[in-house]
Image (spheres, rainbow, N blue to C red):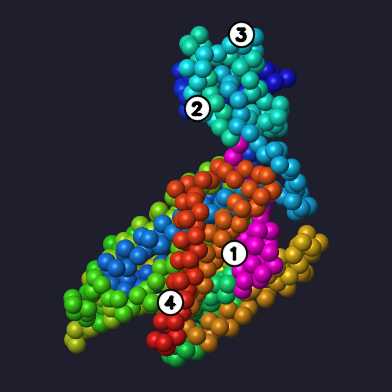
Amino acid sequence: PILNAIMQYEKNTPSPSIAVSSHWQVPATEQSNGFNAFVAFCFAINYILGTGFLTIPWAFTQGGLLLSAVLLSFVGIFSDMAKNYLLESLARAEAMLDLNMHWIKKKPGQEEKPFPLVYSPLIPLGGSLHPEHNPDEVGKGSIDYESIAINTKPLSTSSAPRTPEICSPLSPATPKLLQLSKKKYRIKGRKFEVNVLCRVFLGKTGLNIYTFFVCLYIYCTLWAYTSVFSSALARTIPIFSDESANYIVYSVLFTIIVVPLSCLELDEQVVVQVALTICRFLMLALMIITADTCAKESSIKDEKEDVLLFRPEGIHKMIPVIVFAHIYHHSIPGLSHPVRDKRKLKHIFQATCFFTTVAYTVVGLVLGSAFGLQGIEQSSNLNWQNYHGGTATYDEYGNPMYDTASWWAKAVSYYIVLFPAADVVSAFPLNAITLGNNLMGSLFGRRLHEFESNRMVRIQFRLLAACPPILLGVLVRELGEITDYAGTTGFIIGFSFPALLYLQSRLKASRKNFLTSTLYESYASSKPLAVFLFLFGIIMLTYVTVCLVFSG
């Protein structure tokens, strides 16, 4: 049966000339459904590139352009380290817990050993045997036997060929023997929310602390979404002469739209999310291209000396914003679960971190230098509400008449100002669902499976997640002030908790006779770096909170 399975799989194996390489690896067999890498990237971009990037230019002017760009790069690296720590913790939980969420018991000496020598590639039906080998020809490589399928069912590693006696080369060329590497745990079919990881590896105290911070963070995120939607429409499509009245009206409209959506299950949204990613890219491009013209048309004329490279007195305002714009780690389990090939998760999220860091840097530098400290709005898209691209005619007092602007200038203006408002309508329910699930999991714990199928219970928790931040958005409307305090919680849930989960899951695995290696190991997979990231989150939370309190 093994040889028949190998023959069925032969069409997916590399050619013999490639297969004899010491680095050859059997290609992964992907699941029949789930997201591909591009769709997963789009979902990750839509989570992380929400309203946070709108305040990046304002943050750059607060801390100085060069200082902000340098610190933003470090925050991007730290964010990438943290996502690796979470992926490793998820992989260990998958390996160490049974379906009833109980520890799998292993006695000392039962941990997995490195696989013995095998010939590469696999033997074809009727191939010759090579019971002897030359130790000098030994190479290194890895073969994932779980990717070999028998009638679409994975072939277990226990039944896969592992010794030279049942393996031989596909070609007459001299084969290289592969020392199969030690098994590495990876994420599979189950989903563990971060609060579940906290309960498993950190205990009830860790769970309660994490729940407090993640609730505070997501509530502030939803609060910011309310502010973006209501502010943008109140200024762009006013109903009354009083802007405050317009803000309240659009807050009510926002409530009518997003609260029912937050109570629904969002299963089919791939097309929508990919389309929104493309729209985000277009908006970023338009803002960068038209920033200089828009600044010259602004009613506030900024002096060049207003744009500073270093402004240390504003660092406590800048850091929370750039941290807020990088945080998506609480959503990593939900983003990972529908991905078809979970071996690619590290690279998908790494590409996300790289792209967002570069995009934030370019937007911050271009818009910050164009508008300056006094000219940039806290929600930078609002700078385009009077944009006319130099196509408007002027009255006798030298003021532009926006009604005379060309159609394309009006289209750019409306698109940049209104798109974030439309975008948060889709982002709000996603975050509200995440928060509702975390609240429900924190309350019910191990009994969660008894209640999560009850629709009325789910609706109650999602209402609890969705309604309070809308009320806060009506009371406090300045987006910069909101992200100041939301960013402080990001230090803990984005840096400290992932590092702590990595340390504790690694310690648990060692004590319970499991392997500590995972498929998601990286440059950050070391105890000193994890300790550093944990302490960095704690120290920065303390520093920024003290600065905000005293500056207030």
Residue at the image point whose x is 61% and y is 53% from the top:
507
Please state which amino acid type lies under the numbered disc 4.
Answer: Tyr
Question: Marks 3 and 2, how far apart in space?
Answer: 22 Å
User: Which residue, given by chain and number where applicable, does mark 2 sit on?
Assistant: 140
User: Which residue, given by chain and number where applicable, does mark 1 sit on?
Assistant: 430
Specify the segment rendered in magenta.
183-212
Of the image marks 3 and 2, the number of the one nearer the N terminus: 3
User: Which residue, given by chain and number where applicable, does mark 4 sit on?
Assistant: 543
Q: Indicate the secondary structure of the residue bearing disc 2.
A: strand
User: Which residue, given by chain and number where applicable, does mark 3 sit on?
Assistant: 128
Q: Indicate the secondary structure of the residue bearing disc 3.
A: loop
Residue at the image point whose x is 36% and y is 60% from the top:
73
Left or right of residue 551, residue 89 in this image: right
Q: Indicate the secondary structure of the residue bearing disc 4.
A: helix
**Looking at the image, which is closer to me, 130 or 126?**
130
Measuring from the top left, give residue 316's x and y in whole percent. Answer: 38, 77
Vertical side of 196 occupied by 439: above or below: below
Left or right of residue 271, residue 465 in this image: right
Q: Indicate the secondary structure of the residue bearing disc 1.
A: helix
Of the image marks 1 and 2, the number of the one nearer the N terminus: 2
